[in-house]
Image (cartoon, rainbow, N blue to C red):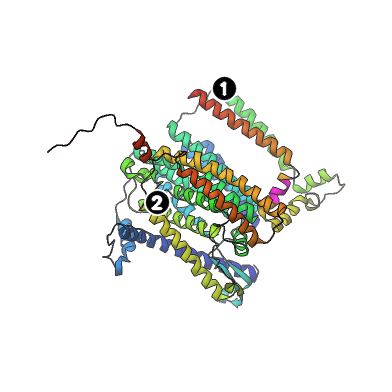
């Protein structure tokens, strides 16, 4: 093995250790953050007994979950019952490997580490575990594997509630995957590449994609909520109907694994939103383009801030909105988001053709601004249509139009 | 290194495929099929076809097999007893296995070098790289234009008409499926 190859492997291992440690510790802290945020929104204090301000609560929960007795239903399919949490957990963790979290770090070293021999690495080191050429396609592919964990958990438990939860989750995730995939095609159209590195570079040159591709961002965010089974789309585990849905029969650490997977998926979706629509680690302005360690640290911190904002946003939505009804959920996915995403692809294609070939604008900044103009019009039309109640009828509207069947008894005394 | 990785995934694909047909439980069989498809995707990556690999996982392992699993779970198939009994089944099995064995034997004799010589009709054994240059061209193209760009250009320029014909075929299939579903409902 050449010293360069060994250097590459050494740095990759270090990056892996860093990313997975951050994700696993981060996920543990997110459970605390979720409880703190919900407490804040409901005027409570949240967990504050274990450690300073409740900071050790995740550790206490972890210890409790490991020490708890594991039960499994007598009629469960043993193998698949054990396999299902792992199948939910592994894809969720794999996804964190492809998200770039900081600007490339220029590295130049040539060292000899005892019996392992010489290690060398020269040139910029991309701050991502695996810099894949297929970029977000990998994320779509692996996140579609996460369905198996939930579907099998539902089926192998041999319980009605779990099975219903598993079926709901499968149907929901497949449906919203379609809208999610279609919402990313405009990104591909203007960046010309699926790799995250190229997408971030293109956003640095032009504008963050949230401005020229607002509707894509909107559809992606909604589909992201549905893909991670978070409220308002948490029908697979709707506690008022299905007890706990697909993980009804799970206990102890297996139960916990589903939650770790869910939070890891939330982190991935938020990281995707940040990378694809908010410039990834990009800091607006020009000061950060001289490279170096300082730039890597600053961009990493900025990426983390954006990521935390979106994670907070996900929690904010969860503790604000009520759950959808199942038919509304399916109608939203297939009858609203998918046609809008398809029409939006046509609009963006036409707009890009018009801007680049008819108007002859090639400067990325000007091109993004022109697309932003198109988007303002499109957004007004789409949100006007959605708000008019033609596609989704809120339960509120229905109640107003329906006549009461029984005359309300008058309360006297 | 690449060869070792290839053999690992190839062995995994073959073992999973065998387990897929040997499992009595329909859900386990479907899962082994998923693992076969996953190993195939890994082999595509080794061939520098990352896009095909991603699509393989996304479409086959991710969407098609999930629908399979969905149907199996809804139908609630138990441990189905084997219905491959009787002399006629055994005879059919023997014939199919024999044909497959002959095919594999014929393919086994074909090394890339021999195939290259037969295609180029060179008197001596030719170097596969000179005959199958397309692979390297594709690699350079992918490096220059990205994985998707390298695939999209021929698909939407040279092979536009076959591509559109395929889309119409698929559209017809979708319309047919919707019509059938509506009639039964």
- What SS does tag 1 mark? helix
**Magenta includes B153?**
yes
Q: How dense is the environment of label 2, judged by Cα within 10 Å: few (below 14), some, or many (20 and up)?
A: many
Q: How dense is the environment of label 1, judged by Cα within 10 Å: few (below 14), some, or many (20 and up)?
A: few
What's the CA distance linking mark 1 and mark 2? Answer: 49 Å
Both marks 1 and 2 on one chain: no
Q: In this view of the protein, can residue A141 be seen by the observer? A: no
Q: Position of residue A391 (x, y in %)?
A: 47, 39
Magenta part mainly helix, strand or loop?
Answer: helix
Q: Which residue is mark 1?
A: B87
On residue B65, the disc is none
The foreground one among A354 and A315 is A354
Q: Position of residue A332 (x, y in %)?
A: 46, 41
* Chain under callout 1: B
- Stretch of the chain drawn in magenta: B150-155
Quarter of the rendering occupied by the N terminus of chain A: bottom right
* Chain under callout 2: A
The foreground one among A53 and A319 is A319
Quarter occupied by residue A361:
bottom right
The foreground one among B85 and A406 is A406
Q: Residue furthest left?
A: A413
- Asked if residue A250 lies left or right of residue A120, the reply is left
Q: Position of residue A241 (x, y in %)?
A: 32, 40
**Magenta includes A184?**
no
Q: Position of residue A317 (x, y in %)?
A: 39, 53
The foreground one among B15 and B34 is B34
On residue A258, the disc is 2
């Amino acid at each position: 093995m050449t010293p360069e190859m060994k250097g590459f492997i050494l740095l990759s291992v270090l990056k892996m250790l860093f990313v997975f440690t951050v994700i696993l510790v981060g996920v543990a802290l997110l459970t605390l953050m979720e409880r703190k945020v919900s407490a804040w929104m409901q005027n409570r204090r949240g967990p504050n007994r274990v450690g300073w301000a409740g900071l050790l609560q995740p550790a206490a929960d972890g210890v409790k979950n490991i020490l708890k007795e594991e039960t499994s239903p007598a009629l469960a399919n043993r193998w698949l019952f054990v396999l299902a949490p792992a199948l939910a957990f592994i894809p969720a963790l794999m996804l964190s490997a492809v998200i770039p979290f900081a600007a490339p770090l220029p590295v130049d070293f040539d060292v000899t580490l005892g019996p392992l021999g010489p290690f060398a690495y020269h040139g910029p080191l991309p701050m991502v575990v695996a810099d894949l050429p297929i970029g977000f396609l990998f994320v779509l592919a692996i996140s579609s594997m996460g369905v198996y964990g939930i579907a099998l958990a539902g089926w192998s438990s041999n319980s009605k509630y779990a099975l219903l939860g598993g079926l709901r989750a499968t149907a929901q995730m497949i449906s919203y995957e379609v809208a999610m995939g279609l919402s990313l095609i405009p990104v591909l159209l203007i960046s010309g590449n699926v790799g995250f590195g190229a997408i971030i570079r293109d956003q640095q040159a032009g504008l963050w994609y949230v401005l020229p591709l607002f509707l894509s961002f909107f559809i992606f965010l909604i589909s992201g909520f549905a893909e991670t089974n978070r409220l308002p789309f948490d029908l697979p585990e709707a506690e008022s109907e299905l007890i706990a849905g697909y993980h009804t029969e799970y206990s102890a650490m297996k139960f916990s694994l589903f939650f770790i997977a869910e939070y890891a998926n939330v982190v991935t979706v938020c990281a995707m939103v940040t990378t694809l629509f908010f410039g990834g680690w990009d800091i607006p302005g020009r000061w950060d383009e001289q490279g170096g360690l300082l730039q890597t640290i600053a961009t990493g911190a900025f990426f983390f801030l954006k990521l935390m904002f979106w994670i907070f946003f996900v929690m904010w939505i969860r503790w604000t909105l009520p759950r959808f009804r199942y038919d509304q959920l399916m109608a939203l996915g297939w009858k609203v988001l998918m046609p809008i995403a398809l029409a939006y692809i046509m609009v963006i294609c036409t707009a890009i053709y018009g801007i680049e070939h008819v108007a002859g604008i090639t400067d990325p900044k000007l091109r993004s601004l022109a697309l932003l103009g198109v988007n303002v019009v499109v957004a007004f039309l789409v949100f006007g249509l959605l708000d008019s109640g033609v596609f989704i009828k809120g339960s509120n509207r229905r109640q107003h139009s329906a006549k009461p069947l029984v005359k309300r008894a008058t309360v006297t005394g | 290194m690449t060869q070792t990785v290839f053999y690992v995934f190839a062995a995994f694909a073959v073992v999973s495929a065998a387990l897929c047909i040997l499992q009595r439980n329909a859900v386990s069989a479907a899962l082994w099929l998923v693992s076969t498809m996953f190993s195939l995707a890994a082999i595509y990556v080794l061939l520098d076809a990352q896009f095909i690999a991603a699509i393989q996982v996304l479409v086959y392992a991710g969407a098609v097999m999930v629908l399979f699993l969905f149907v199996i779970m809804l139908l609630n198939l138990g441990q189905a007893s084997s219905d491959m009994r009787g002399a006629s089944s055994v005879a059919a099995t023997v014939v199919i296995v024999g044909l497959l064995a002959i095919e594999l034997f014929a393919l086994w004799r074909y090394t890339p070098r021999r195939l290259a010589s037969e295609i180029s009709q060179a008197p001596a054994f030719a170097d596969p790289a000179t005959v199958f240059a397309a692979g390297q061209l594709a690699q350079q193209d992918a490096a220059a234009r990205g994985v998707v760009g390298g695939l999209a250009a021929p698909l939407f320029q040279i092979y536009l008409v076959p591509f559109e014909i395929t889309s119409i075929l698929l559209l017809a299939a979708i319309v047919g499926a919707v019509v059938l579903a509506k009639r039964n409902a």
